[in-house]
Image (tube, rainbow, N blue to C red):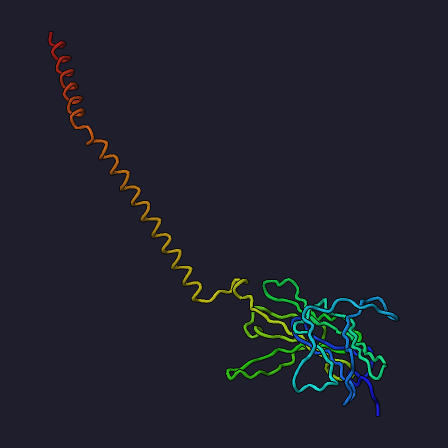
Amino acid sequence: TLTGIIHPSTDGTKLYAAVGSSVSLPCVFSSGLTPSDPIWEKLKPGFLFKPSSGRLPASFSLSSSSSQPLSDKSASLTEVEVGDKGRYRCSGALDGQQLSRNMELVVAKIISSPPSKTSVTLTCDLTDSSEVTDYEWVQLISDLNGSQSVQSVQKGISLSINTESEENQGEWACRFSGKHGILGNVTYHIHTMSGLSGHKSPGSSQNTAVVVGLGFLLLVLLLILAQMYKNHRRRKRIFQFPALETIVHTNSNEREERERNQEKK
């Protein structure tokens, strides 16, 4: 009977996880065996024969469950980041013998090109694609009951999506496979760009017309009030000194009368 670390069964096993997801790092010893001093390490890149250990990711944690057997020393990352990629090593001692297993975490993400007014291009990106033989893009469609179905769209590492179509709104996934089946997938959420590309709904156009109309009425009202204020100021100046206006008018009449008398002489 084979004893030691049974899962992963070989060194260099690749584990795939999408950015933002959780992933299990398996380290299971033979049934009934309880290793002493189990250790997890993240190996620094560039050291193949005698790798040195680096710092474990912030989201790293040892798996702990009441139903978990003592032979299971697995760990997990609760939220994967691109920087978590690389090699990990699990080790433990059995009967004075040190056993270890190396594995590699491959991180997947989707790169989106700067969206134009009508489309966006998505590209499936993996930190190590050496075992990937096929890429497939699928659309995740949810119905009114909350159940989800998968609709295959096309093969290939990249996908161009028309963002003007409401049918393209929602979750899209890049599913990547190897020689023995599906390795993993990574999802991306599409927001339609209809509002940015000039295609506005009838309700939006009506609201714009109402705002413009109210603005015009307010401008007219302000002009009327300004004219009324100017007229009010003019009348106020005229009636502010009525006695002075009478004196000026009397002097003018007397001057005209003296001029007529001089002409008669």
Residue 247 horizontal/vertical position (percent) = 15, 22
Q: Is residue 145 visible?
A: yes
Name above or below for residue 177 compared with residue 128: below
Residue 260 placement, left or right of 228: left
Residue 27 sits in which quadrant?
bottom right
Residue drawn at (74%, 81%) of the image: 73
Q: As rendered, which of 250 and 58 lies closer to the eye?
A: 58
Residue plotted at (37% across, 56% down): 213
x, y (%) of residue 210? 38, 59
Picture quarter containing residue 255?
top left
Number of numbered labels in the structure image: 0
Q: Is residue 132 visible?
A: no
Q: Return the residue found at the far top.
A: 265
Q: Residue at x 15, y 24 (%)?
A: 246
Instruction: Using the image as rendered, state which of residue 1 and residue 203 is in the foreground.
Output: 1
Quarter that holds the C terminus: top left
Q: Is residue 153 above or below residue 30?
A: above
- Residue at 16% from the left image edge and 22% from the top image edge: 249
Residue 29 drawn at (x, y percent): 78, 85
Left/right placement of residue 249 relative to residue 218 reads left
Depicted 101 relative to depicted 251: above or below = below
Residue 113: image quadrant is: bottom right
Q: Which residue is the extreme one toward the bottom?
A: 1
**Left or right of 252 on screen, residue 132:** right
> Residue 262: x and y, percent?
13, 9
Q: Quadrant of the N terminus?
A: bottom right
Q: Is residue 51 left or right of residue 229?
A: right
